[in-house]
Image (spheres, rainbow, N blue to C red):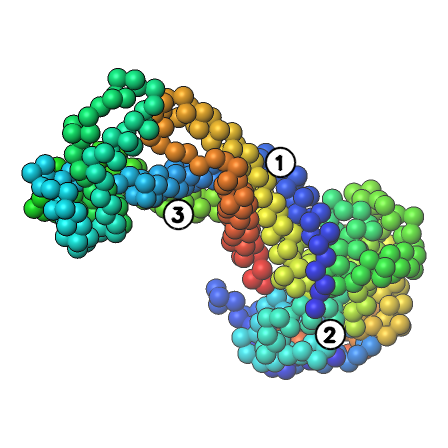
């Protein structure tokens, strides 16, 4: 479960990125986080991954309190999350297989687990024939699927996707969303930060709208908001 | 707890090194140079200390007894001489024993075969404890009633003391400075690798890798560079030492200076080079990676 209670975050230059947000995301939920640029979406993701600490309020992520978590526990907290980025963030010098195996090694998986799990996850994502390819040899959609495979490979309880369709065409974006819905149906909590209003409206999931560091709308269904996302 | 995967970390360390071949080569060369300078000065200091101790043990002060004294009076001086600080033993040598020792030392010199013992003097062979206080000790012996003259290798003793002291001070200072320089060079090289792999490090952190897991490949990289530099420095030091030993043997016909054979010191030299190389490498890598582990 993710819980933000009265969270405020002010950067050193005085910019208030988050101005008192309270938000609960239950286990197994699918949530779209939408809003214009500068509304605080990316800041919330950084709060959830422990890259930033709130200046006020409490952030709980899958049983870890971000304010109280000690340094050695941060990796344990992060292992409960799988993060997918708009620019994929794959390692160019590594093959698809190695991009997945190094994150498994990083959390202590043994070679047998790695050999077992990676082909299975690549099969689910229809990437089994790309195992030995380098990221530059893949299309944008394929690269994003590898990024999702990497996020899933350590069996996190929550997937956080930051603008995952930003670099994909509409068809690939739709495929990707369907994939995330499937992941969610298997019990994983999914939080998607996106600008793609059509996608948001199409899936009828919970939509949390942010503006200027505040939640302006939180409901299931379509997004609500006058400003154009950008 | 993540299990320590030696093979994986070692391979990653090698990959890191090869990703910046030129910089790695430069770092290894510079560290090798630093180790060689440190080693050379340390070996000079070690050899000087060894010669000094040999000199202290084997080179006795010879105190000649006044010729007007009888042998009995001469032998009575022993107690007085032993009461002088820094003298640990006093051995009375009669003229006849002195002649016998001289002819035994120079058996080829026919001229001295039938010498009269009367041309030698009774004497004391005095063993001293601390060669650095030899001047004071000699002055005290000279002022002892019944002692006519004292002989000792003043210049040689003071020369070796100077060499030993200078080498010890210079090597201590150089070890300090060059150690820091080597750590800095290796640290900068590894900083390049960490910069090159910053995206990878960021991803590792986001998926929950511990700082130790992220750090290990860089520690191995530094360790490998340090060990390679240490190993090569040992081989070069060996060659240099052999060359210097040969040159000294050629020019020091009287064998005034003794040089420790390399076969007796190769193990501590190798251990010191590899140990210092390892410390420099690991120290450099730890310094380089520290700031990447903040988040």
Pick whichever, A158 or B129, lies toward us. B129
Q: Is residue B248 left or right of residue A154?
A: left
Q: Which mark is residue A208?
A: 2
Residue B171 percent location from the top left of the image: 37, 42
Real-space Cα separation, disc 3 to disc 1, in angstroms: 28 Å
Q: Which mark is residue B176?
A: 3
At a point 28% along the width and 39% down the height, the residue shown is B59
Residue B97 position (above or below residue A157):
above
Real-space Cα separation, disc 2 to disc 1, in angstroms: 50 Å
Quadrant, the C terminus of chain A: bottom right
Q: Are marks 3 and 2 on the same chain?
A: no
Q: Quadrant of residue A8?
A: bottom right
Residue B200 position (above or below residue B253):
below
> Which residue in the protein does label 1 denote?
B21
Quadrant, the N terminus of chain A: bottom right
Of all chains, the one bearing label 1 is B
Mark closer to the observer (3, 2): 3
Of all chains, the one bearing label 2 is A
Q: Is residue A96 something one can see in this rendering?
A: yes
| Residue neighbourhood size for the residue with mark 1, other residues' Cα within 10 Å, grouped as few (<14), some (14–19), many (≥20) | few
């Amino acid at each position: 479960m993710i819980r933000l209670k009265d969270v405020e975050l002010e950067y050193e230059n005085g910019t208030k990125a988050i101005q008192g947000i309270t938000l609960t995301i239950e286990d197994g939920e699918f949530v779209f986080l939408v809003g214009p640029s500068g509304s605080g979406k990316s800041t919330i993701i950084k709060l959830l991954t422990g890259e930033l600490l709130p200046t006020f309020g409490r952030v709980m992520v899958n049983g870890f309190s971000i304010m109280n978590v000690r340094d050695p526990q941060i990796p344990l907290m992060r292992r409960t999350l799988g993060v997918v980025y708009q620019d994929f963030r794959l390692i160019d010098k590594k093959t698809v297989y190695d991009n997945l195996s190094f994150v498994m090694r990083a959390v202590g998986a043994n070679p047998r687990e790695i050999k077992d799990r990676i082909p299975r996850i690549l099969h689910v994502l229809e990437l089994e024939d790309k195992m030995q390819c380098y990221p530059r040899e893949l299309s944008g959609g394929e690269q994003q699927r590898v990024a999702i495979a990497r996020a899933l490979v350590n069996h996190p309880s929550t997937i956080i996707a930051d603008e995952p369709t930003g670099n994909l065409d509409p068809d690939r974006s739709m495929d990707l969303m369907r994939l995330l819905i499937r992941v969610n149906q298997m019990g994983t909590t999914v939080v998607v930060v996106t600008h793609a209003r059509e996608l948001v409206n199409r899936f009828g999931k919970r939509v949390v709208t942010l503006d200027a560091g505040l939640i302006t709308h939180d409901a299931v269904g379509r997004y609500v908001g006058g400003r154009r996302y950008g | 707890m993540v299990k320590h995967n030696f093979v994986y970390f070692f391979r990653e360390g090698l990959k890191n090194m090869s990703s910046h071949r030129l910089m790695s080569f430069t770092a290894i060369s510079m560290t090798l140079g630093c180790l060689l300078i440190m080693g050379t000065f340390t070996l000079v200091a070690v050899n000087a200390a060894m010669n000094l101790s040999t000199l202290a043990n084997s080179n006795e002060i010879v105190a000649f007894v006044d010729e007007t004294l009888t042998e009995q009076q001469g032998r009575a001086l022993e107690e007085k001489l032993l009461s002088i600080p820094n003298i640990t033993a006093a051995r009375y040598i009669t003229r006849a024993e002195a002649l016998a020792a001289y002819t035994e030392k120079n058996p080829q010199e026919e001229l001295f075969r039938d010498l009269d013992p009367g041309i030698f003097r009774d004497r004391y062979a005095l063993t001293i404890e601390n060669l650095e206080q030899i001047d004071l000790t000699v002055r005290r012996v000279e002022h002892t009633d019944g002692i006519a003259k004292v002989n000792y290798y003043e210049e040689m003793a003071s020369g070796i003391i100077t060499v030993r002291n200078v080498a010890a001070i210079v090597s201590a200072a150089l070890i300090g400075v060059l150690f820091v320089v080597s750590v800095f060079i290796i640290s900068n090289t590894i900083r390049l690798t960490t910069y090159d792999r910053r995206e990878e490090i960021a991803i590792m952190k986001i998926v929950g890798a511990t700082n130790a897991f992220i750090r290990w490949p860089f520690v191995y990289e530094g360790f490998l560079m340090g060990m390679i530099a240490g190993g090569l420095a040992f081989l070069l030091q060996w060659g240099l030492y052999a060359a210097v030993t040969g040159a000294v043997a050629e020019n020091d016909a009287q064998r005034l200076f003794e040089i420790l054979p390399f076969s007796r010191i190769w193990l501590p030299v190798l251990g010191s080079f590899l140990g210092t190389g390892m410390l420099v490498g690991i120290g450099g890598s730890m310094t380089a990676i520290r700031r990447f582990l903040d988040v």
